[in-house]
Amino acid sequence: MHLFFILFITLIVCTNGQSDNFPDCKSGPLSSFPICNQSLPSQQRAVDLISRMTLVEKISHMITTADAISRLGLPKYEWWSEALHGLAYSPGVFFGGDLPAATSFPMPINLGATFNMRLVHDIASIISTEARAFNNEGQAGLTFFTPNINIFRDPRWGRGQETPGEDPFLTSQYVYALIQGLQRGDDERYLKIAANCKHFDGYDLENWNGTDRHHFNAKVTDQDLVETYLPSFKTCIQDAQVASIMCSYNSINGIPACAHQFLLETIARESFHLNGFVVSDCGAIGNILYTHHYTLTVEDTVAVALHAGTDLECGVFYLFHLHEALDRKKIVETDIDQALMRTFDVLIRLGWFDPPEQQIYRHLNKNNVDTLEARQLSLISAQESIVLLKNMNNTLPLNMDQLMNKKIALIGPTSDATVTMQGIYHGQAPFLIDPVTGFKNLTTGKLINIEHARGCGITHYDKKDFAAAIKLAQSSDIVIFFGGIDHTVEREGVDRKSITLPDIQLTLIRELEKVSRSPLHIVIMSGSSIDLSYIRDSTQCGSLVWIGYPGQSGGLALANIIFGQYNPAGRLPVTFYPASYVDKVSMFDMQMRPSPVNPGRTYKFYTGKAVYEFGYGLSYTTFNYTYNNDTIISFYSIQSLIKNNYKTDRTLISLIRINVTNTGKMEGDDVILAYVTLPNAIDYQIVPFKQLFGFERIHLAINETKEVFFPFTIGAALTVARDASKWLHPGLYHITIGQQRMFSIELKGQSVRLA
């Protein structure tokens, strides 16, 4: 979304004030009409309200900043609020007064690294509780344009940090847990808040090589669309039952997303059964005409967007041009009514029209914001997301008792990072614990001297602060370097040009290696892949930790891991590619599979050697896996499997049982990842090298064993053909747990097309 739109619409909202946030269905102008009759279906109530609106009033409610209609007792409503990882600055969200801040959790890329969907649900539940409290004070709306569930296809994408990673299965599991936590709560009669899955679809480019997202035409094969780009939206819409989706800026195969009737109507509504509305990304309706040149006139633009199923606009194109489309008979008033029915239906399901005394969500207040539970969860989620990438000779964790009366140097541009820890789409946090503060707080009373020097900036090549950093390192017993990137390099509107660690940081690391008394410890803050091969291979770098953007408690979470108060178990949710990867593939190339001009994308198709693979992460302890089923190869008949459950991808083939034992000397979590390698397809298409079909995060005491279960279903075994058809083929399906191939499942019989 454009910063221009945020500022413009915020100005409108601030000018109008925030009083009288709800219609009065007890004694207001609408109180005696069906809209206020709670016994009626929500859509019937919405139709009644729309029938009482004039055309001018209807049009004023076709944009996200909707006017008040005083004669009907309808207050103004701002549809655009943000809550990606906590309430965030946006036209509908205000920080101040009794609610000056809201909990700032780690970025979604961090939450993907936890592989803990129970945690994701709990975080979403706290976010929705705080959102309701803000809404009751007139400081937020009830409709939130979150989450971003596009696949992190290319490591240069500036908004990849907003997603849980590169894998469709992980993203689908994430969005299901998140939407349940956001939309469902203690009162099943109402949506807690209305979430929005974005950006539908094929959106993962900001501005690269002279083409920005407003002009980009994503050329996506049917195979990749079904296999990679659609699954997370299918889960969001069909399974999680999200209340809205957002159509994206880009075109898909020549048709702008917000004018794409097949995408919005055929797929989202008819196939996935969307029960809610479609909103455009901000300014995307105008893009149909002005940047994609898909239409020739404003009235045609309005018509194709409305007929495609775009019900609500973030922007003002509808406001200015719906009348013209009506006058020229490109649309009819019932088209507008249909769109309004979908948006008002969601407000009704949110309880916007119903008396507050009947709704528990309407009684949430400042006491439900920034609670002890929220603070604890912000710390826990940050700790669970941190990934230990290297630990040469077990140099970590540091022993505080052995460091008494010694000095630790914290050096680097992210060592005192505060707002940077929040990532993008953040709000006002109640506090921000930077790494320096976290280390000092944890070591208080331990007689450990913690000193700090930044040494350099994130990217600017200026060595003027090197001397102070090197001098500090020379006099210290332990040196920890904090580097990485920030929003100046990766954010909305900005894609990365390279995936290397900035030169100034590598230069400083090499200088510190020369003077440090012991191997360096390296901490990297980023929301995306960085080529860390130098640090991985250097014998002068003892450990390497990736912390993403860990939120308000990030500094303390990191200190707890460095000093062994918490055993790291995060796993990379993306592939860390070598720097040369971006020289081999264009960001414009949406194809997932390798080709002469594309080495393949994500762990499923990348043909090169990764710096660090998807799912990689170390622990301070060790774990052993043993297969708990009866045989090494299990046999199943395809025809028997589908006989009574034809065309269902949830049919169970085998329940895979694994015993996990903590064989080390420290209690801790383990993340168990289950992959399948499909048999070679009969028409020589390229199948994924492997694909994730299950994961579980468990906690184990020393010597403790737990059994975990992974259902291997028909859906996990399906092969997507070039024409997007889904097939169940005979052959061997090899099951890998982590990096260990455990056993195989053989399907016998004839290939069957399931979709």
Image: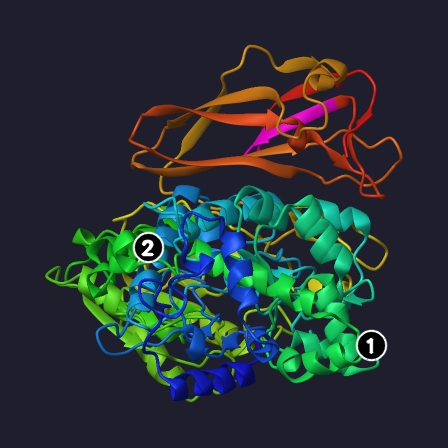
| Observer-nearest of 30 and 480 | 30
What residue is disc 2 on? 126
Callout count:
2
Side of 236 relative to 12 (left or right): right
Residue occupying the far right of the picture = 683
Above or below residue 237? Residue 127 is: below
Q: Residue at x 82, y 39 (%)?
A: 721
Residue occupying the far top of the picture = 630
Q: Is residue 614 visible?
A: no
| Observer-nearest of 168 and 454 | 168
Residue 210 x/y as whole percent: 74, 81
Give the class, few, some or many, for how many residues have Cα within 10 Å of label 2's Cα (few <14, many ≥20): many
Comes first in the chain, label 1 or label 2: 2
User: Magenta span covers which residues?
Assistant: 732-740
Q: Residue at x 35, y 69 (%)?
A: 28
Side of 62 relative to 449 (left or right): right
Q: Main secondary structure of the magenta part?
A: strand
Residue 544 x/y as whole percent: 44, 57
| Observer-nearest of 589 and 93 | 93
Q: Secondary structure at mark 1?
A: loop
